[in-house]
Image (cartoon, helix red, strand yellow):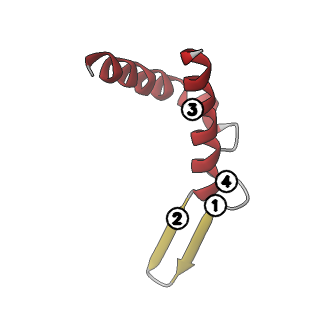
């Protein structure tokens, strides 16, 4: 469990450091991301971005376990 937490923390730090470059990839503005704006209300749910990130993380975990 300690190893998982340490690796997760390192990944979070790396993503935080690389965020300016990752933002240029367009994540968060993909087709399928839900954004609703009404008077005094705004709702944003990055559905497609979440799926893409989940697939990439699953692929990385699968490759590391082989």
Question: According to the image, label 4 marks what residue?
Answer: 29
Choose the circle earlier in sequence order: 3 or 2: 2
Disc 1/disc 3 C-alpha distance (Å):
19 Å
60 versus 24 height, above or below? above
Q: x, y (%) of residue 14? A: 47, 21
30 versus 41 height, above or below? above
* In this rendering, position of residue 16 left or right of residue 23: left
Disc 1/disc 4 C-alpha distance (Å):
7 Å
* In this rendering, position of residue 1 left or right of residue 44: left
Question: According to the image, label 2 marks what residue?
Answer: 44
Image quadrant where residue 19 sits: top right
Q: Quadrant of the N terminus?
A: top left
Of the two numbered discs 1 and 3 in the rendering, the one whose residue sits closer to the viewer: 3
Of the two numbered discs 1 and 4 in the rendering, the one whose residue sits closer to the viewer: 1
Choose the circle earlier in sequence order: 4 or 2: 4
Disc 1/disc 2 C-alpha distance (Å):
8 Å
Question: According to the image, label 1 marks what residue?
Answer: 33
Image quadrant where residue 57 sits: top right
């Amino acid at each position: 469990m300690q190893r998982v937490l340490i690796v997760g923390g390192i990944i979070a730090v790396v993503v935080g450091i690389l965020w300016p470059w990752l933002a240029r990839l367009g994540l968060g503005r993909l087709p399928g991301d839900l954004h609703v704006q009404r008077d005094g209300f705004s709702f944003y749910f990055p559905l497609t971005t979440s799926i893409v990130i989940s697939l990439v993380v699953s692929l990385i975990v699968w490759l590391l376990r082989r």
